[in-house]
Amino acid sequence: MRQKLIQSKFKKITLERTSGFVSFQSYSIEIYADGIVNLSVIKFQDKIGSYSWKIESEAVKTLNESIFKYGFFTMKGKEPTITATDMSFCNISILLENGRFREIEHYLGENKYPIRLATLENKIEKIIHVGQYIGKW
């Protein structure tokens, strides 16, 4: 009989977006297991500053499910076959309650990681409603 793998919940998620070099814009997000979200906008469209809010427990649950649904900890990079310059970055790191940690520096100008990484990044932003603070990316 197969034993079901028990998945640890996240303790902290960080996500940082940086636009291409032509119009440098950047923001970073920290999300904690208790639902606290901190957003630091270095420059994004016309916005600069720091914001904090709390997401519902259902949103925290959805984040936990998404981490494993999209295979963040098992995702493998490959040698890119497409490379473009001056593109955006989306760096993401996740620390689980059991101490497991992974960080991925995701350069959006190459196809090193599966599309599901970008899907996860976008889903995290949607779940926490970051768009209400920065508008659309």
Image (spheres, rainbow, N blue to C red):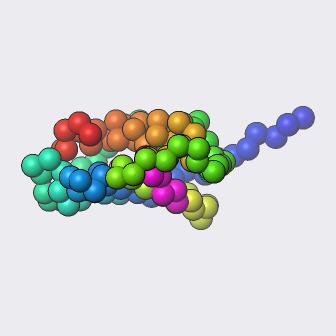
Name the residue: 35% across, 41% down. 125
Of 32 and 116, the residue lying toward us: 116
Of 70 and 61, the residue lying toward us: 70
Taking 74 as reference, is 132 above or below it? above
User: What secondary structure is the magenta-colored segment mainly?
Assistant: strand
Measured as percent of width and height from the top left, residue 63 is found at: 46, 41
> Where, by quadrant of the figure, is residue 100 drawn?
bottom right
Q: Quadrant of the C terminus?
A: top left
Measured as percent of width and height from the top left, residue 127 is found at: 36, 37
Name the residue: 52% across, 60% down. 103
Query: How many tags in the picture?
Result: 0
Of 51 and 135, the residue lying toward us: 135
**With 107 as the anchor, is 88 left or right in this view?**
left
Taking 91 as reference, is 109 above or below it? above
The magenta stretch spans residue 104: yes
Residue farthest toward the right in the current orientation of the protein: 1
Q: Quadrant of the N terminus?
A: top right
Magenta stretch bounds: 103-108
Name the residue: 58% across, 48% down. 80
**With 11 as the anchor, is 137 left or right in this view?**
left
Name the residue: 85% across, 37% down. 2
Residue farthest toward the bottom in the current orientation of the protein: 99
Measured as percent of width and height from the top left, residue 34 is found at: 39, 53
Does residue 72 show up? no
The magenta stretch spans residue 7: no
